[in-house]
Image (cartoon, rainbow, N blue to C red):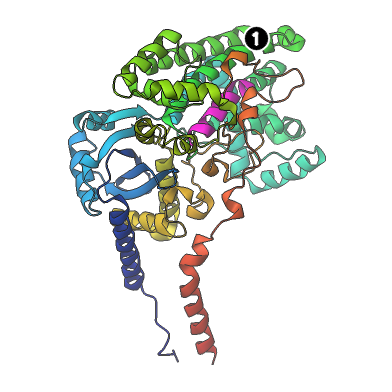
Amino acid sequence: MLRNDVPIITGDTARNDVMALEEEYRNRIKQDFAGRKNLVLISDGWSSLKSNFTLYSIMIGYLDPNYNMRQQLVGMVDVDKASAVNLHRLFCEELFKSDINISQFKYAVTDGGTNLKTLCEKLNLERSYCGCHLLHLIMEKVIEVGEVKRMLSKCKSVATKVSKSSKTRTLLKTKAQEFNINAPLPQNYSKTRWNGSRLLVKSVKEYIPVLVSLPSFAEDLFTLKERLLMEFFIEFTRPFQKATTRFESTNSSTSELLPYLSLLKRNVSEIYSIFLERADVLEHADTEVFQRIMSLADELLEKRLKKMREQQLLKMCSYLDPRFCKKQCLSPDEWGLVERDIISHFPEIELYNTILKQEPFKQLEDNVMLFWKSKRQNLPLLTELASELLTIPASSASTERVFSGAGRLMSNRLRNRLSSESCSSLLLVKAMIGYENFQTISEEDYGVLDSDDDRSTCNGLENRTDAPMIGAGDYSPLLDWSNHQIAIRDDGSDMDFDKYDDPNVPGPSERRINLRERATRIPRIQKKNLKSSKSK
């Protein structure tokens, strides 16, 4: 017999609880953003083969009272026709639920979608292109080089065989122990996953000694020329992965796009030059392939950098970032033009330049806004401008994390009738639970990653699933462009990017709140009481 004092959790009860939590979250948003101006709109779209709807996320980038850059989910919309006009209408309706007006936004970060680009133009928003998407588009071109494409095809064949057979996976793990291989098993990647091709090639290369000893992989063995190409590809794409990891961190700023891409372009040429000095490469590798890869990447990067140098917004952001002001990412003449435009409205520029000369930039904190927080008394006008511009994130990676949660929801076969409204409500509630701001929730707590997740890892942090969330790959000592050293050192250690990493930064796992435990604690207790009453 059931106990009368134990409530029964039904579908309607759970649905009402979720709606109540969503309403609570929206009330908090109303309080946080009431009357705020010059906000940053971060948006992207997502759809799944397992759903019949397309979701667009709406996130706000802003600066909190402690001068920390934040990105907070404020809405999800189901879009039938993703035109700019339709998006405008749906965005306004969704924001109205939280008492936010579209006119409160001044800047935007999106990918290269025509609809979002047109929307920003209609709303007169100054738009910054997502740095992670930009690098991903360049890599998509690189992997279309014939030899690289064939090498990747072999790697995908290996990963497919591994994924289809549990017996093969067990055998590979056993053999890997004999060869002291600790790398993860090869896995195929989604086309939308940033740096997916590099991660696949790297894992397959690690397992080559094991593959040779297994007859099931006889058709997938790699020649010496292919192995050298794999090695070059891994090293060549390393700076791309590190730049992506930096751009997707929550404290990255648009001010980093020009400097980091300039450094990346330099590293591409340096890696190629160093590889040509190796005797085994000259003897066995097809150096023409390396040349084509390097030339293509260099051309694509230069094309992107040229467009960026024409954007006044990006140049002003880099100027107001004391880590990059007047460094080699722009010519002295270009810096002079930027300074002239700013000084006409902000006479504090001369004092700003004096402060930069007196305080070595290498001692600045990673969060550039802490610099402006300390100078708000001496430079009040410039601090206000920097608080606007440097809050613009370098990428729209925060929206991808939202879609990872959506993919997790849709991958559950028990949710085959999940509506877009329920999915949106669940995502908003998960953004609320545990932390006040969505971006501080680790992806593991927010929702286990699906195949479309775009997170990437960097050298030294590849086993840390929480790394990108806390800014793994943060370049704490700032870039010294005048004394920049070669990309790969003679001792075989990693690139100069590493000296900007901070591996000692504690990850969210050290202060993690188990959201699933919190969300299900009460139902579990009720279920336990229900079982005990039945046994009695």
Q: Is 383 included in the stretch rendered in magenta?
A: no
* Horizontal side, residue 338 vs residue 472: left or right: left
Q: Residue at x 47, y 74 (%)?
A: 522
Q: Nearer the viewer, residue 170 or 278?
A: 278
Residue 198 locus on image (x, y percent): 58, 29
Location of the N terminus by quadrant is: bottom left
* Horizontal side, residue 286 vs residue 181: left or right: left
Residue 214 locus on image (x, y percent): 74, 35
Q: Which residues are magenta?
A: 233-248
Q: Is residue 233 above or below residue 56?
A: above
| Residue that numbered label 1 is attached to | 273
Secondary structure under the numbered disc 1 in the rendered image: helix
- As drawn, which residue projects farthest toward the right? 178
Kind of residue indicated by mark 1: Ser
Q: Nearer the viewer, residue 67 or 451?
A: 67
Q: Nearer the viewer, residue 60 or 334?
A: 334
> Can the viewer see residue 179 in this picture?
yes
Q: Is residue 407 above or below residue 385?
A: below
Q: Which image quadrant is residue 421 in?
A: bottom left
Q: Residue at x 19, y 49 (%)?
A: 93
Residue 138 locus on image (x, y percent): 46, 21
User: Main SS type for the magenta part?
Assistant: helix
> Can the viewer see residue 112 in this picture?
no
Q: Residue at x 42, y 51 (%)?
A: 438
Dot 1 surroundings within 10 Å: few (below 14), some, or many (20 or more)? Answer: some
* Horizontal side, residue 335 vs residue 126: left or right: right
Q: Which image quadrant is residue 360 in?
A: top right
